[in-house]
Amino acid sequence: FQVKEISTKPFEGQKPGTSGLRKRVKVFQQEHYTENFVQAIFDSIKAEGATLVIGGDGRYFSLETVQTILRIGSANAVAKFIVGKDAILSTPAASNIIRKYKADGGILLTASHNPGGPDNDFGIKYNVSNGGPAPENVTNKIYEKTKTIQKYKIIEAPAVDLSKIGDFTYGPTKVSVIDSVADYLILLKSIFDFPLIQSFLDAHISDYRVLFDGLHGVTGPYAKEILVGTLGLPEASVQNCVPLPDFGGGHPDPNLTYARSLVDAVEKNEIQFGAASDGDGDRNMIYGKGAFVNPSDSLAIIANWAHVIPYFQKNGVKGLARSMPTSKAIDLVAKKKGLECFEVPTGWKFFGNLMDAGRLSICGEESFGTGSDHIREKDGLWAVMAWLNIIAAANAKSPNKLIGINDLLLAHYEEYGRSFFSRYDYEEVPSEGANALVAHINDALKTGSLINTTHKSPSTSTEFTVSNIYNFEYTDPIDKSVSSNQGQVITFSDGSRVVFRLSGTGSQGATVRMYVERYVPPEAGAAELARDAADGLKGLIEVALEITKLKEFLGRDEPTVIT
Ligand code: VG1
Ligand code: CO
């Protein structure tokens, strides 16, 4: 084999966002574009002699990109690649493989929940040796390299057949093609009480039915192996579980808007426990008949019930954490249990240091991401199994009444109070409008013009008084690195808050996210606690939209997605 050096020129904008570099497929298909970014990764790490994992959600352009990585990696003297069969490894499965086989890092080919196919999105994300997304010092280094790159190294060798499991040699490099599911299944079995879940599901085969929707993303084969293969549920318990390069034309994002296929089937067939995951398998939505679990509540409930999960029985719960816009429901659980609770910026990479330092066990984000220190990514199927484990444990103590999702939610609210939470997404708005909105809020922040002003909601007549406005900044408690401008927060005198952020995962225009939260204590009573979230937040949302003039700046009357 021979190493060739190819001259190239930098491309603008190869800056990894919240979770890797995400662009339209057509952008990645430009001559040298993908090669440049891959070489920039190898220039930023110690590639020589390294063992690296390659996986992804199987989206369009993945197979070609794996071969590109093998060719460039081999030319850069990578010792070994561990690749998921057919280029498939869910994001959590890849994180597990990196840790289990002590690899130096991994390259994940995914744009997560963004649609796929020739006219949609592709993405490349680098993970480090703890199995988590590269921290900002690494992604900044990669970005710097992309700005000055003049050449990349490549070898000529026939493509590796990724459809066959086994060990191959590729130039000077070893390539091991592995089963995508096996190691992940072993992992989950070591975490959850499978016998308890099994006996509950067996006993309730007709009155507690389960439906998992893979949205044609990567989790299909994993969910099938766990739910059908291991727990013995009927085939009808899974749907859309064949991964497709374009996700069947859908938007593989588990929320009430994009996971309609799950919501409709659950409602129509009166399914007690439904769940879905996103394209790369790190997100989850728990949705039963008439029962939607808000991700912020999901996190708090899993933490509150951690004692029924064998992994936490064995390892204890070291600490809890949430991303800044996630509701403070988890903080209340931490307080009651005497645990440390951290507030980090959006993006899973911020949890890794805390976990590595032994200070964090369970964490999550409002964006349907929940997970623990069993790996260093959020984990969709882990959350599904956590819920099944909790439901099974709750029912083991309740022989006469079947406990379902809504019972757990209400019991939690009655114990801790409820943080009504909602997120409005304004997707792909003009960047000028989004920037003007940010500038407008910054202006209010600088001049203090909104502080102590009172605003009345036109429809509910509730009044909200602004108490503070700030830009969220985070200092990592472990390595002391500082991340600034992580979202604008407006707090109100009743403890409510509204957060504004620009998304870092979009590939076109700008996406503005508005997060609203209002806390109601347990004393408010069951009726108030069980209210519809949209209803409980109506007044606050009206006031937030009014004081920020959001509709004017964005030229949008309604958000594209409401969670
Ligand atoms: C979004 C979510 C964030 C999540 C990120 C990656 O980021 O808000 O919570 O960590 O996606 O998730 P942003 O910058 O668009 O708000 V995934 O499942 O796309 O890897
Ligand atoms: Co994802």
Image: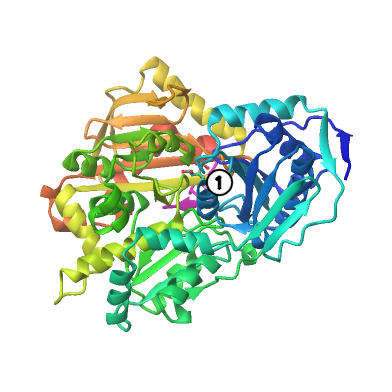
Q: Position of residue 507 (x, y in %)?
A: 64, 43
Q: Position of residue 337 (x, y in %)?
A: 18, 43
At 34% across and 59% down in the image, what residue appears? 386
User: Under tag 1, what secondary structure?
Assistant: strand
At 27% across and 45% down in the image, what residue appears? 317
Q: Is residue 132 left or right of residue 333?
A: right
- Say which residue label 1 marks: 427
Q: Amino acid at mark 1?
A: Glu
Near-viewer residue (383 or 434):
383
Mainly helix, strand or loop, the magenta region? loop
- Does 132 appear in magenta? no
Name which quarter of the figure residue 115 lies in: bottom right
Q: Is residue 211 left or right of residue 330?
A: right
Identify the magenta region: 555-563
Q: Is residue 235 left or right of residue 66?
A: left
Task: Identify whether 46 is placed above or below 57.
Answer: above
